[in-house]
Amino acid sequence: MNTKKSSKTTSPDVVLIGAGIMSATLGVLLKKLNPAITISIYERLDRVTAESSDPWNNAGTGHSAFCELNYTPELPDGSVETKKAVKIAESFEVSKEFWAYLVENGVIDTPESFINKIPHMSFVWGEENVNYLRKRHAALTKHHLFKGMEYSEDKNEISSWVPIVMEGRDAQEKVAATRMDLGTDVNFGALTKFMFDYLEKQNGVALYLNHEVDDIDQLKTGEWGIEVKDRATRKSQKIRTKFVFIGAGGGSLPLLEKSGIPEGKGFGGFPVSGQWLVCNKPEIIERHQAKVYGKASVGSPPMSVPHLDTRMINGQKALLFGPYAGFSTKFLKNGSYMDLPLSIKLNNIRPMLAAGIHNIPLTKYLIDQVRQSPEDRLDALKDYLPDAKLEDWTLETAGQRVQVIKKDKKVGGVLEFGTEMVTAADGSLAALLGASPGASTSVSIMLDLINRCFREAKSKEWQEQFREIIPSYGKSLAKDGELAAKTRARTTEVLQLNASQLEEEITA
């Protein structure tokens, strides 16, 4: 990635803070909608995708709610709630539409360099969990977005899907699994780099690496004044812009606080770190071909849902297990231990204290995770891989996540496990807070941002462009089964995700 500044300007139309999947997606969308727009992108590290978008720092599941059990909670009456799963599945289909557009228009040459077909599975054991999974399968498969999901309690069939998961398992143990053949693995780091490579070639776009935003204030004119420091030379400069997007992952909260917008008052952040066990034995890696998600431990955050995960990273097949959660006061993997203390302000201390009081099980869980020995981590792995040996796995650090804490009238403050878009009333600034499902739903999130913040979004010209980029734009893939089937068939073909098999399933 070069750092050429041929389009250098101190008054761009748009400033994007953070060089991850969100800024890349927004930048490409805006440049497609208005080729004349000028954009400056500032990243505090010396490369793009160095934080949450890096493939080693996120799940890479292509979150489509096929296998993530935390998106389908069991309600007190015993039924399974599917609304969130349907919404996420629909958003992921929209993301695939955008990525297919990038392939069709030459932004990305080879789809397999960032997206690959990998079955998504849920796996549980014990009678209570098996009953839950059976109900979840019945509830989800009533919806067309989950058509084709298989369910089995047959050990031989499950063994044919994931042999190493079943080897060495107690023959008397009751197990169940679901399998969705349409699942994908997404290297969001590679995808993001493709988009930044494209943006750097466009007139009016400048990418500044190793540049940190120190301050941000709204001027009397309504524009934003931004102070940016070159971390290499230590020199600062002032930037003026009409619109700011803060997409800096865990670093978004401190910048939102500096902006001073009323809409940002009361938000806090709770950082959660993570680790993976990475398999170092090729013969084990080759024998597993699936993303296998289980049920989270009581009190654990959603990002800690355990999974035995086949990944394609830089053209190489990998096998990861985890993540193991932990606690750090850093908001970024490359951040400062003072991030959390410095984020506490008068306007958010009550919500943060209230959220802490109401999440004591989470605190206990994180303390237990930090204290884990290698043998403890191996025991967790053995739930999914009974014959696992410690010497076949290496512990690696995953990404840092900051869960959103927001005001709540009833209890003072609540911990939110998801993403939160905060926008200024005048539409001149937007900040994205939170984590999962994040990257997988980035296109829907950025479309929502554009509609909130850009008046041109309602124009005939932009509406036509939206439909060219996202053919289903303005329609509901969750409600229109025929449209969803056609959309899925088209993106599967363009992204080379086994279209012929998909078409057979749709027409069966």
Image: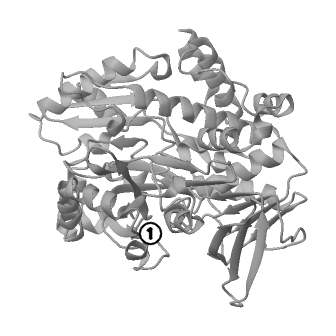
Horizontal side of 305 relative to 174 (left or right) equals right
350 vs 104, nearest the viewer: 350
Badge 1 is on which residue?
331
Horizontal side of 403 relative to 377 (left or right) equals right
317 vs 191, nearest the viewer: 191
**Quarter-of-image position of residue 460:** top right
Residue 132 is at least partly visible in this image: yes
430 vs 372, nearest the viewer: 430
Q: Amino acid at mark 1?
A: Phe
| Residue 260 x %, y % | 56, 64
Q: Compared with residue 131, is residue 318 higher up or lower down, i.e. above or below?
A: below
Question: Could you tell me which quadrant the N terminus lies in?
Answer: bottom right
Q: Compared with residue 426, is residue 498 higher up or lower down, i.e. above or below?
A: above
Q: Compared with residue 59, is residue 373 higher up or lower down, i.e. above or below?
A: below
Horizontal side of 358 relative to 405 (left or right) equals left
Q: Secondary structure at mark 1?
A: loop
